[in-house]
Amino acid sequence: MPPAAKATPATPPDAPADDVAALSFEEALAELERIVRGLEGGQQKLEEAITAYERGSRLRRHCEAKLAQAEQRVQAIVAAGDGALGLRAAD
């Protein structure tokens, strides 16, 4: 079994929305990828597919928020001059 598959157990699509907030970016992305693969497989019953899609939507929003937070942190570091690491555009 690949390491990514072992990293987080599958979370049921009908798990409460508030548990998404507790997931790291990596955990949420891995679960979202599993949901997408399941939906693309087309083997779920309609109601299960809808429930999975709803959870996937919450996970997507969570991932987007985590990425936005990370971008803000990087911008703050660069603006402060503490670790530009060659990120400045060449003149």
Image (cartoon, rainbow, N blue to C red):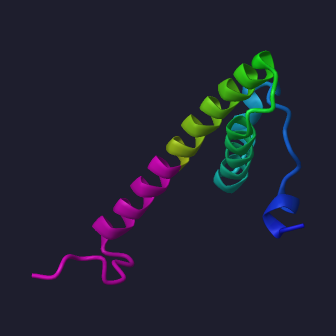
Determine if the magenta segment contains residue 60: no
- Using residue 54 as the reference point, say whether residue 85 is left or right of it: left
Residue 41 drawn above or below residue 91: above
Residue 35's image quarter?
Answer: top right
Q: Nearer the viewer, residue 37 or 82?
A: 37
Say which quarter of the image contains residue 83. bottom left
Number of numbered labels in the structure image: 0
What residue is shown at x 66% (from left), y 24% (from top)?
54
Q: Residue 9: image x %, image y %?
A: 89, 49
Q: Nearer the viewer, residue 57 or 78?
A: 57
**Residue that extends furthest to the front in the rendered view of this protein:** 42
Q: What are the residue bounds of the magenta stretch?
A: 67-91
Quadrant (top left/top right/bottom left/bottom right) for the C terminus: bottom left
Instruction: Examine the structure image and report whether residue 79 is included in the region drawn in magenta.
Output: yes
Farthest residue, direction top: 47
| Residue 88 shown left or right of residue 72 in the figure | left
Q: In this view, does 85 lie above or below 15?
A: below
Quarter of the N terminus within the rendering: bottom right
Q: Residue furthest left?
A: 91
Residue located 84% across and 39% down the image: 11
Identify which residue is drawn at 65% across, 50% down. Answer: 29
- Residue 21 in the image: x percent, y percent? 69, 37
Task: Name above or below for residue 71 compared with residue 58.
Answer: below
Residue 65 is situated, as x and y percent measured from the top left of the image, at 51, 42
